[in-house]
Image (cartoon, helix red, strand yellow):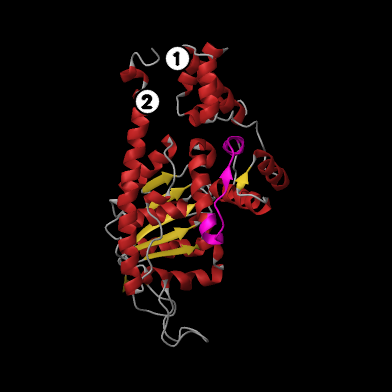
Amino acid sequence: MLFDHAETSLQPLVGKFALLQRDLDDARRELASQRISQEKSQRSGQRQSRYTFASFVGASPAAVEVKRQARRAAQTASPVLLLGETGTGKELLAHAIHASSARADGPFISLNIAAVPDTLLEAEFFGVAPGAYTGADRKGREGKFRLAHGGTLFLDEIGDMPLGLQSKLLRALQEGEIEPLGSNKLMPFDARVIAATSRDLNKLVREGNFREDLFYRLNVLPIRVPPLRERREDIPALVEVLGEDMALRSGAQPPELSADALSLLSAQVWRGNIRELRNVLEQATMRSDSHRILASQLQAVLRESGVAQVEPVPALATPGEAASAVTATVRPLAEQVAELERQAIEAAMTAARGNKAAAAKMLGISRATLYGRLDDVA
């Protein structure tokens, strides 16, 4: 019989199902909490977080691990440093950490340092005293630190902060008080700081472009957000969620991708990560006369976008095709598992361009295990 030892042969599937069920239950609780929080913020006019951990889509080992670390960080009051490439979801995680923290009822204030001119950053951070300079508001202006009082302050692209302002930020974090521009009065604040960057802060410190003492102050709870190429198994779920969001915004039907199209997307490098994936989906959807997207349509978009392509991962058969194949030839389970394993290893090695360490990370196994499997299939 195919499942003579079901308790062992089905154990991985049962474990996977239990993990997905737990994530689904967590998502339901978090979405309910988010609805309550949004209703409160609408009544009070207060700025709140827009995302929860349910918004960080993925059940891959890499996605599960980063959510585990972020959930633990949410239970503390220490600064959090989110590290990762652009488009990986660092801001989303910052929102989620706030929404799951004891400060969830407080404001969530964000500031993208790279988007603000250096000359205006100090005013954005610390505020402006009444009549501080010609043209200043006579009532003064509160800075982000004061606006975030009782809540969370998210500093995006912290690696782009000019050196001259870093010392003032360090003092504010150490003393828990700020001095508005043009004022001699110190004002206390109570805000939890979450910082994020796509740059290598260790390198910036070595080069003298980022204060070492500020780095240690922020690097209390570092969380590395993995790039999309390290969690390829999450791409089908991400495509579904992104498609639904695109449909809500446009009022059109969400795109439906063929198995070959999904396989093609799963094989890309995605240097722009989830942001790039969304862009490709939007382009393909806009060009298509139907809501169904084929691999050939995606190939055209990828080619014109200059995205490096690798051979697509073999697509899974449809249920009908699978049934026909089983009827035609039934082989021992061990042979089928070995063949699937060989295909997965070949696809990972192709996607990683022969880099065994990267291929092992994609497959969620150790390098030693991969070496052993390669010897077996050689």
Q: Give the range drawn in magenta.
A: 246-267
* Image spot of residue 154 (x, y percent): 42, 60
Residue at the image position 58 percent from the left and 12 percent from the top? 378
Asked which quadrant contains residue 66, the reply is top left
* Image spot of residue 93 (x, y percent): 41, 52
Residue at the image position 62 percent from the left and 32 percent from the top? 312
Q: Amino acid under label 2?
A: Pro
Q: In this view, does 338 lie above or below 206?
A: above
Whether residue 364 appears in magenta in the rendering, the answer is no
Left or right: 369 in relation to 25: right
Return the residue nearer the eye: 85 or 79.
85
Q: Which mark is residue 333?
A: 1
Check disc 2 and report its element: helix, strand or loop.
helix
Q: Is residue 248 above or below residue 325?
A: below
Q: Amino acid under label 1?
A: Leu
Asked which quadrant contains residue 17, the reply is top left
Q: Mark 2 points at which residue?
A: 12
